[in-house]
Structure formats: structure tokens, C-alpha cells
Image (cartoon, rainbow, N blue to C red):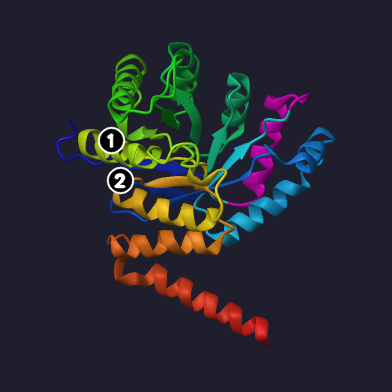
Amino acid sequence: MSGGVHYETRLRSATQEVVIGRGHRFCLIGERINPTGRRIFQDQLRAGDLSAIERDVHAQVVGGADVLDVNMGVPLTDEAELLSQAVQLIQKLTDKPLCIDSSVVEALEAGLSVYQGRALVNSVTAEDERLEQILPIVKKYDAAVIALPNDVDEIPMEPEKRLELVQKILDVATGEYGIAAHDILIDPLAMPIGADTATGEATLETMRRVRDEHGLNMTCGASNVSFGMPGRHELNAAFLTAAMTSGLTSAIMDVRTPSIVSAVKATDLLLGHDEWGMEWIARSRAATAAAAAGQA
């Protein structure tokens, strides 16, 4: 049990720190630097053209990202070399901390080895083999890590099973590798509600229990929930509001969608995470100024 403890996870670039935790503004992790489903981007990366990364960085920083997720999973490339190049380029373009994202162990280490700061690693599961492969790297580079409570057998639907796997990950990470609990972000497994509408409540219940029983920070792929459904922006915004009230403290999301970001910022304000409403007021003034400039 957490005993009322609520952890803070600290990520850093060379010059900037971002704190993830209850009582802090919700952490927006921009998901765009990812070639999955982007054929043109994949072709560019295979040809050694990284220019799209510059555009994606700019769009996400403008959209309000606090951290940038970077994934270079392109078939028929040297992912380790590509991720290393991308991390170094992004650090020249922005001082936002990075979430280094790969399923390839060698690529994760290549990205972490050139990163200047304290990164977030995306991700590890409860599978014994993955824990043995990923956690030593997390410890070596003093990173934080996203952990998913699924194992080799299944992605469990029941919150109880998910919590059992959360406990396993915690025990292994803290007990065997000396990774602090505050450096473990749980992904409560946001699943497409179009496949089963019961999954939404299962995920929210998982969040509430992770918050209340462990005090851990959490993140998830926010757009997973609406996959295959119409009105995706509205669904994602509603989900994030519900998730934030259930303990979610960050999300990997498309920050280029103002309506979704506005829903997050409004929830921050209502939960008391935006002192004096200064972030909300500044955002509103900026939107008004942009609208006026567009009409001029």
C-alpha cells in the first residue's frame, strides 16, 4: 500500500526539468515523432532524410508538449543508428526532455547513450525476459521507465490481474535492480472501446487502484481508446478528463489537437493543478491573440 505517498518523477534535458506527479500540471508527452503508419516518413528515414522530425518537433512544442516521445522503428533500417541520430537532432531543436521509445534493446541503449539529461524509457512489460533486458539499461542510464502490466500470456482485462502484474514489476525493479518506485510509470492499458465498451471502466479502475494502493505515476497512449470509432477527438478528450480524475498524471498523445489539450488544461484547473488559473488564462489570451492576428 502507498500509505498516502504520491511519487514525483523527474525528467530532464540538458537545461530543463519536468516533474510528473499529482499536484503538478498534467504532463503532455507528444507522440508524433513515430513512423508507424506514416509511409512517406518511413521512406524519408530510410533515405537518411530527417527533415520531417524538425517539423514534428516544432508542431508539438507549439502545441504544448512537455516531453517528446521519439520512436524510429522503421523496417529495413539500422534502428539503433537512426534513433541515435534522431535523439541528437532533437536535442539541437528543443530543450524538452525526451521519452526514448523502442522495442529493440540495442536501439534503446543507443538512444540513451547520446541523450543529455534524464530520459523516460518506453517501455517494459511484466515478461521476465523483457524485465531482464530493459531494467539494467534503465538503471545504467539513470532513466525513468514506463511499465505495462501484461505478460507473455495475455493483456489482462481484469483490473485485479493488472494490479498483480504491477506488483511483480515493482518487486523486480526495486528489489533486483535498485530502481526507485518514483521512476516507474505504470501504463494501465488503455484499450479500444470500439472492441469492448467495458474496457474503459476497467482501465479507469486500474488507474484508481494504482493511485490509491501504490501512489505511482501513470501514462498511457491516450488515442488507443478511440481507435476505430467516429468522433475520436471528443472521445479522447472525455477519456483524458476521466483518467485525470482517476489518477493519470501524463499521457502520450497528439498535442497538435487543441480541443484535446484544452480539455486537459481545463481539468488541471478544476483539480487545483493550475495555481490561480494562470496556465488557463495564458492559453486563452494566446488563442484570442492568434484569432485576432488571423483576422487582421
Picture layout, residue 159 above or below residue 86: above
Horizontally, residue 76 falls left or right of residue 166, namely: right
Magenta stretch?
75-94
Query: In the depicted view, which residue is nearer to us: 14 or 65?
Result: 65
Kind of residue sitting beneath label 1:
Val
Picture layout, residue 168 above or below residue 95: above
The numbered mark, 2 or 1, whose residue comes first in the sequence reads 1
Residue drawn at x 14%, y 36% as measured from the top left: 3
Quadrant of the image containing the C terminus: bottom right
Dot 2 corresponds to which residue?
247
Residue placed furthest toward the right: 47
Dot 1 corresponds to which residue?
210
The answer to whether one can see residue 216 in this image is: no
Classify 10 Å Cα crowding around label 1: few (below 14), some (14-19), many (20 and above): many
Residue drawn at x 48%, y 16% as measured from the top left: 130
Picture layout, residue 33 above or below residue 47: below
Snapshot quadrant of residue 84: top right
Q: Position of residue 143 (x, y in %)?
A: 45, 31
Picture layout, residue 59 above or below residue 108: below
Horizontally, residue 217 falls left or right of residue 99, namely: left
Q: Is 105 included in the stretch rendered in magenta?
A: no
The answer to whether one can see residue 93 in this image is: yes
Residue placed furthest toward the bottom: 296
